[in-house]
Amino acid sequence: MMLREINKQQYRQRLNRVIVAAIALLTVVALSISTTLIHFFGDEAGSNFVLNLAGVVLGGGLVLQLLRYYRAHPYMREVMYVWDLKHELNLINRKIRNIEQAAQQGDETAMQVLHFSYQGSRQLWQLDDNTITLDELRPLMDRLENQAATQGLHLDVNAYSRTLLDQF
């Protein structure tokens, strides 16, 4: 995955619209399915919890399928980029202890992965206005850059690929 610049205002606007649309669709579909199931299979004297749950599950499945279908639509470009970035950072975070240990021992691959992780996290937190966490990230970035400079390594965010994680 490669980091790219995106328009923060456009991202926030589109994300909010997608969230509102997904919630509205989930609500309408879940209520419609639940009501239909209760009408045909419901028990007047008992609980219809299972039928209501089925409506919610089927509605959620429909919303997920629609999001997958429209994933490649140009309107979803920023939203899906951030979604993919979060997924990539999650994959890195699953192996972060091993990556950090290898980076401390001077492993160039580990330092490249950490560099991508720090830069990706910085971009993500700026998009989400998470300035408190950004302050904690700066010293980590500085330490990594100093270590790379000491070893004569050039850290390039574009050098990252998911296959690098296989080493850890």
Image (cartoon, grey):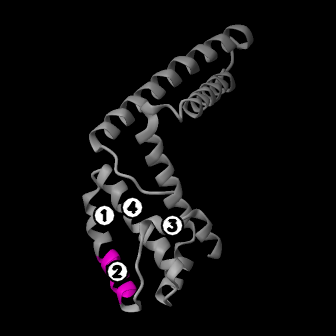
Near-viewer residue (63 or 26):
63
The amino acid pointed to by label 2 is: Glu
Q: Choose mark 3 or mark 4, whichever is in front.
A: 3
Relative to 58, is 106 on the left or the right?
A: left
Q: Where is residue 124 in the image (x, y as percent from the top left)?
A: 37, 54
Sequence-earlier tag: 2 or 1: 1
Q: In this figure, which residue is indicated by the disc labeled 3?
A: 160
Label 2, label 3: how many angstroms apart (C-alpha)? 16 Å
Write the residue at 61% across / 12% down. Answer: 35
Write the residue at 45% across / 46% down. Answer: 81
Q: In this figure, which residue is indicated by the disc labeled 4?
A: 121
Q: In this figure, which residue is indicated by the disc labeled 1?
A: 133
Relative to 46, is 126 on the left or the right?
A: left
Sequence-earlier tag: 3 or 4: 4
Q: Is mark 1 on a helix, strand or loop?
A: helix
Q: Is mark 2 on a helix, strand or loop?
A: helix
Q: Residues within 10 Å of mark 1 (few under 14, many from 20)?
A: few
Relative to 12, is 40 on the left or the right?
A: right
Q: Position of residue 59 (x, y in %)?
A: 60, 25
Label 3, label 4: how many angstroms apart (C-alpha)? 14 Å
Establish if 131 lies above or below 32.
below
Label 1, label 4: how many angstroms apart (C-alpha)? 9 Å
The amino acid pointed to by label 1 is: Thr
* Region of the chain picked out in magenta, as a range: 139-149
Sequence-earlier tag: 1 or 4: 4
Q: Position of residue 18 (x, y in %)?
A: 43, 31
Task: Evaluate if marks 1 and 4 touch, with contact meaning CB atoms under 8 Å apart.
Answer: yes
